[in-house]
Image (cartoon, grey):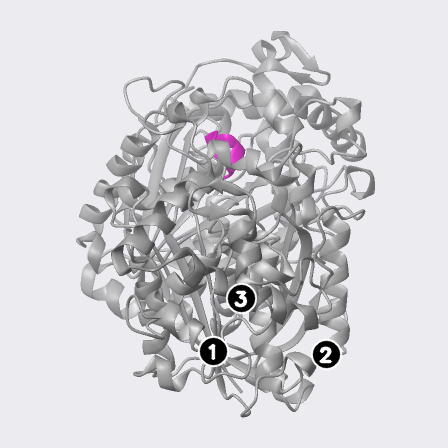
Amino acid sequence: MTKRVAIVGIGATGFRPITPDVSYREMIFDAARKAYTDAGLEPDEIGGFITATEDFQEGYSIADEYCPDQIGAVLRPTQTVPGDFIQALATGYMMIMTGAFKTVAVEAHSKASNVMNIGELMGFALDPIYNRPLRETPHTIAGLEMTRYMFETCTSSLSCAEVVAKNMGNALHNPYAAFGAEIDAHDVLNSAPISLPLHRLDIAQHADGAVVVVLADGETANSLTNAPVWIEGVGWCSDTPTLEMRDWGEAAYAQLAADMAYRMAGISNPAAEIDFFEICDEYSFKELQHMEALRLCMPGEAAHLVETGVTAIAGELPVNVSGGALGVGHLFEASGAQKILELVEQLRGEAGTRQIHDVEVGLAQTWRGVPTATGAVAILSNR
Amino acid sequence: MGYRKVAIVGAGITKFVRRAQETGKELSWQAAKMALDSCELTLDEVDCVTLGTAPDAFDGVHMKGEYLADGAGAFRKPYMRNYVGGGTGVFSPIHGWFHVASGMADICLVVAEEKMSSCVPHPQGAFLTIFDHTTEQPLMPNLIWIFALEMNRYMQAYGISKADIARVSVKNKKNALDHPSAQVAEAITVEDVLNSETLAWPVNRLDISPASDGAAAVVLASERVARRLTEKPVWIDGIGFSIDTAYWATRDLCYPRYVETAARMAYEMAGITEPSKEIHVAEPYDPFDYKELHHMEGLMLCPRGEAARLTADGVTARDGNLPICPSGGALGVGNPIAATGLMKIIEIFLQLRGEAGKRQVPGKPRCGLAQAWGDLMQMGTVVVMRN
């Protein structure tokens, strides 16, 4: 296949812990307006639209009813993907590859501050027969998973805490980020225990915001912009949703999704061929576990890479330069969108003080959070 | 422009019932297994899975797509859920078409599931939260009320009577007597519909499809694979989908323009210029009897306001010139939302293969159409198929 798909426009609101001044529809409108301006397109010139959203997070049944107006999609081909933004991006990629669409806009948002009981909400994602009666909270499950990961890879809580310090520090350079802070690993270990070994600061806090991306086929992209960001590979995968059946130490979903994306992009040695990474760090240990699943290092080696600064902004394998979910905020289905935003800014050379020099290829990876075992990967380049 | 051809090669469908003993996962598994068995495939040969299911509030499970994943056969596979409200059932093969037509997959399993009975006391409760939190929810509307508004508007605009509309219910429930999955197949009369309990005038109980549990699945394949798997592939030749504004109170409800936009998209792709002549059999969405008429007009199968007359003249009967809902539709077979849409796709698949048994329409149809509708009376999804 010689056909290619590029990101030709992107728009985002900032990400903030609370946004009492705007409704989610206003946030989406703001992001969409910026994205369309960036792409130099009017909404009626866009072929199709996708929204990534989940009903319970919106407080609506059939939340996709409310997607068309603020993105200019009235009476246009519009759909919802109840999944992470990168899954929606993959759908947009496929739509363009069919040849039936030249341009597609993809939207995701979070209005987490509207949800009064996020923990209980996640409880509703558990199997209603086998798991829900046990009244586990999502953090309990994450704590168990962290324990297993640490046991299998001989990783310490301190190494996980180093991830938090790095990412919150990186976020200080990101004007979009909500939770930038100068802290060290001991601050993390001294924060309140939630479900040991998880501490309060090991857990990404929620933020509000919206992101819209405009995709185009190669020909259209070249006519619209001098700086298209190409989608080189996408992959997505679901491991079993059954808690009792999965391997708790490793992230098989991330590995399989990455392998799919690597195959498409023709990448055999990701650590050497990809310049920087935005990896899901909804919990601190997840960044390490996902680095290993993405084959950036052998199982058990990720902690060492963090401790020795290899994954810092100036390191050889920069991971979560944006600040990740720990620094920017957990954005529900827009979590993947924030990572794509960072990739696009870096690849266009628009990342300001956190710009990495001479970057050509970046990777974004997401996970849909407890209790799922679903993840997605996108590889973008400016070549 | 030529697209990579995509065929439906297998299909499976569970019984539609009011209260299934099986969990949603089990229903999905049953349908997926039947679909794979029907074309002699195993799960190992499936590249990607896509699942359609409507609101999480029915099952009461957050991220319902994740919960159903392994039941739908998505274990360690690329798996995504698609969702356009009530239009999901017909949209799910469109999402599958993206997978195969883009070259991302050669074989894509498409599953649609709905288990409405978990929502107690009645699944209608799940719809209380579909309305705008500021402008509409304080009025406490429910679905039957807003469809009563729409039905009334439709009747007023074209001078159609309740009896004209009731004929659709009579026809579909009768057609469903021949459908093995049917939940509410019955031989009834127009008087039975008119005499059934009024829920919100002009909507009576027998004007409405039931709440149901059920699942359906189809297997999509690329041309090369499809020709190897079966001698009777049914090609997806046109897809269309369109959503109207969420502010439904600002629209004229007498005509579903979102269905027209979706249909035009699908017809253009399939090269159809005269739908009423080129489409030989159609399965428009009929959760309410007037909706079948409404959708026939939106699909441009007849002029506006004429659908009731065609029904009265028997044109839309199974042996008529333009058979509509030969399966029995949502009114007869049952309405597990997403699964209903895929049931309609499967009906057209069987009709075009000549395998619909007692439901087979005469004249060896070559081109058929399935359509669904959803959200706040705003979403249209259309698939055109040929053999």
Chain under disc 3:
B
Q: For the residues carrying marks 1 and 2, which lies nearer the camera in this image?
A: 1
Chain under disc 1:
B
Q: Residues within 10 Å of mark 1 (few under 14, many from 20)?
A: some
Q: Residues within 10 Å of mark 2 (few under 14, many from 20)?
A: some
Residue type at mark 2 is: Cys
Separation of disc 1 and disc 2 at Cα?
36 Å
Separation of disc 1 and disc 3 at Cα?
31 Å
Q: Residues within 10 Å of mark 3 (few under 14, many from 20)?
A: many
Q: Is residue B333 left or right of residue A344?
A: right
Residue type at mark 3 is: Pro
Q: Along the line of sight, which residue is nearer the eye, A31 or A203? A: A31
Q: Position of residue B251 (x, y in %)?
A: 25, 47
The label on residue B39 is 2
Circle nearer the N terminus (1, 2): 2
Quarter of the rendering occupied by the N terminus of chain A: bottom left
Circle nearer the N terminus (1, 3): 3
Identify the element where label 2 is drawn: loop
Same subunit, labels 1 and 2: the answer reads yes
Residue type at mark 1 is: Gly
Q: For the residues carrying marks 1 and 3, which lies nearer the camera in this image?
A: 1
Residue positioned 69% across, 55% down in the render = B214
Q: Position of residue B377 (x, y in %)?
A: 38, 49
Residue A89, placed above or below residue B259 = above
Tell whether label 2 touches label 3 (CB within 8 Å): no
Chain under disc 2:
B
- The range drawn in magenta is A53-60
Tell whether label 3 touches label 1 (CB within 8 Å): no
